[in-house]
């Protein structure tokens, strides 16, 4: 069912000629899916999360057309009704549709986050937006500290934006160790080297 919803969202954007929207929601969906699975969401909550991640920016084309822009508050205002209308064509129970619409209507509100599905959607959207907006390291660090709550989301942000440098220090005996390894290898292979 998730694949059908995602394909329908891709087809929906076709008439709007907005390639960025497709790439964006696919990335947000993938991060949300990964974080949700790593955080061991219950199956229904995982499903709702993925539906909301796919649909979270459903209102962007309408907002661009109606307001000339698509800031978060406008997406939250216009999104829920569009998501409910879109999802009615799928065989989903009302509770799933209502929760997905709620998440879409709040995904730019970072206070009073109620539920792991909501928290993870926010984190996944931030991870993608950091790249797409070219956010500074300081901005990323501050928002991760303030908003991210899941262990997986924090680890992903740390790995993606603040990787620890590899330990390239050499021991004092590195050259002798390398020669010994080479000699051991030659002996194991039964290679005779003339001098």
Image (cartoon, rainbow, N blue to C red):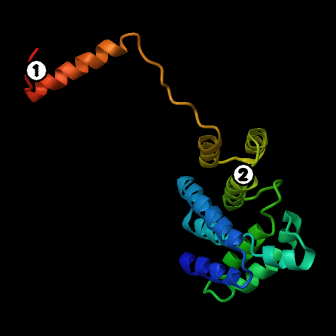
Label 1's element? loop
Residue that extends furthest to the bottom in the rendered view of this protein? 89
Residue 77, given in percent of the width and then of the height, sits at 87, 72
**Residue pointed to by mark 2:** 130
Vertical relation: 14 (above or below) 190: below
Residue at 41%, 14% in the rendered image: 171
The quarter holding residue 183 reads top left
Q: Secondary structure at mark 2?
A: helix
Q: Which quadrant holds residue 123?
A: bottom right
Q: Position of residue 163 (x, y in %)?
A: 59, 37
Q: For the residues marked 2 and 1, what is the alpha-carbon distance in whole angstroms?
A: 57 Å
- The residue furthest right is 67
| Sequence-first disc among 2 and 1 | 2
Mark 2: few/some/many CA within 10 Å (<14, 14-19, 20+): some
Q: Is residue 191 above or below residue 60?
A: above
Q: Position of residue 34 (x, y in %)?
A: 55, 57
**Circle 1: is it few (<14), some (14-19), or many (20+) Cα within 10 Å?**
few
């Amino acid at each position: 069912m998730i694949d059908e919803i995602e394909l329908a969202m891709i087809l929906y954007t076709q008439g709007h000629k907005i390639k960025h929207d497709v790439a964006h929601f696919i990335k947000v969906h993938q991060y949300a899916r990964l974080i949700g699975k790593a955080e061991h969401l219950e199956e229904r909550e995982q499903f709702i999360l993925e539906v909301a991640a796919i649909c979270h920016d459903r209102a962007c084309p309408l907002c661009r057309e109606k307001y000339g822009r698509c800031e978060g508050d406008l997406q939250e205002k216009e999104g829920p009704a569009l998501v409910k209308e879109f999802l009615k064509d799928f065989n989903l129970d009302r509770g799933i549709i209502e929760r997905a619409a709620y998440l879409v209507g709040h995904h730019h509100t970072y206070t009073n986050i109620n539920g792991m599905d909501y928290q993870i959607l926010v984190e996944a959207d931030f991870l993608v937006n950091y790249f797409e907006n070219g956010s500074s390291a300081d901005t990323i660090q501050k928002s991760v500290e303030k908003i991210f709550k899941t262990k997986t989301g924090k680890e992903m942000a740390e790995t993606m934006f603040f990787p620890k440098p590899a330990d390239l220090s050499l021991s004092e005996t590195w050259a002798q160790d390398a020669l010994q390894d080479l000699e051991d290898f030659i002996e194991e292979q039964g290679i005779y080297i003339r001098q």
